[in-house]
Amino acid sequence: MLDLLTTRRFGPLFATQFLGAFNDNLFRTALVFIVAYDLAAADPKQAALLASAAAGLFILPYFLFSGIAGSAADARDKAAICRLVKLSEIAFMALGWAALALGSLPLALGVVFLMGCHSTLFGPVKYAILPQHLKPGELLAGTGLVEGATFVAILLGQVAGGLLATQAVGPVALAIAGLGWLASRFIPPAPPEAGRSINWNPISSSRAALGHAFANRQLLIATLAISWFWALGAIYTSQFVPLAKNEMGATETVATLFLAAFSVGIAVGSVAVGRWLKGRISTRLCAAAGLAMALAGFDLWFAIPAVGAAPKDAAAFFAAAAGWRVLADLTALALAGGVFSVPLYAVLQTAGAAGNRASAIAANNIFNSLFQVAAVLAAGAAVGAGLGMPLVLMLSGLTVLLLLPALHRLGRA
């Protein structure tokens, strides 16, 4: 499986997408830290509002432009789109460097929006290009490596964004963008697989992408299941800090360990599922993985109170068996998440017509963003209404039970 990384058919694309995901999270996280500890240090409410605004601006392009992105990737050479997107990233990061140097918050937020556009355009390409460059028996492994690396890149970008000094963020981000462009130059050509033109209308292109995906039962189930997975991930990752601090009295170090375990767990599960399925595109493990995620969340509900809410550092947290139980539950949930999601992405790449692969990915991205925003808002409202965060997490995981019958039928198809 790892041999793919040394091939030109896959290695340059892998490096390109990894560096792009890293840069997105580096800049956004650095901006949140700069706002919280510098620009709005005296006003925590404003800092929280600006952090939410940055998250919203990054995800907004997925609503607006995913249809166009899918249409473009189906109509043009995907490798050429990769290079164009990476060139735009260089320009965006140069603008981001200027924004940080000038201390201009509006300009920095504008860069966050532009980086969201960058990710929106690249998203359909990075998955739709794989069936053109990989053999059928390699597709699941390649998808798993891309999915796993994305979560590791997110984690590393967030860590780097929190650690780098303000003056270093701009040049580092610009250098990473340059490396991403260099990597993209080695991606082999991937010409369109059906003659079509680009639909530049964001409404009709999105409608067309969604219509294509929903007309195919396999694509519909895969899209809904993947979107549920990303929604659950958004709830968990957005709550690691308050969960550690408010429910278990733990420090930021423990919250960071939660994030690391979650990201690495998904990466390991994403890579392992290809081996378990021996390269065969099959969703027969998805229902079991979804059930495992629900059970891990259920056990977490019992484990958190056992830790206790008394203040404690990382050493004290892991001195008790309950602390390790919490970490084990999160890791198990993440491992199952990797096993759950990768075969479904493979379905998105293969279930529809070859000429509409990117549009199927674009439809998935539209629903992913909708589900994530709705899930985070619903979780916040539930906590605000008096439900404890452990209960919210547990109930969120149990919603997979609604998907299990469809996943079971999909696995038998």
Image (cartoon, rainbow, N blue to C red):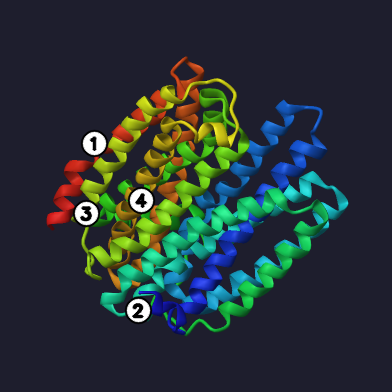
- For this rendering, which residue is in front, 160 or 387? 160
- Decide if residue 147 is in sight here: yes
Question: Circle 2 sits on which residue?
Answer: 134
3D distance between C-alphas at marks 1 and 3:
15 Å
Q: What type is the residue that disc 4 sits on?
A: Leu
Task: Choose mark 4 or mark 3, whichever is in front.
Answer: 4
How far, Cα to Cα, is label 2 from label 3?
A: 22 Å
Residue appearing at x 40%, y 78% in the figure:
4
| Amino acid type, residue under disc 3 in the picture | Leu
Measure the alpha-carbon separation of dots 4 and 3. Answer: 12 Å
Of the numbered discs 1 and 4, the one sitting upstream in the chain is: 4
Q: Is residue 77 visible?
A: no
* Residue depicted at 47% across the width and 51% down the height: 263
Q: Which residue: 37% across, 66% down?
A: 143
Question: Outermost residue, right direction?
Answer: 102
Q: Which residue is mark 1?
A: 401
As measured in the structure, the alpha-carbon distance from the residue carrying label 2 to the one carrying label 4 is 25 Å
Q: Is residue 86 left or right of residue 188?
A: right
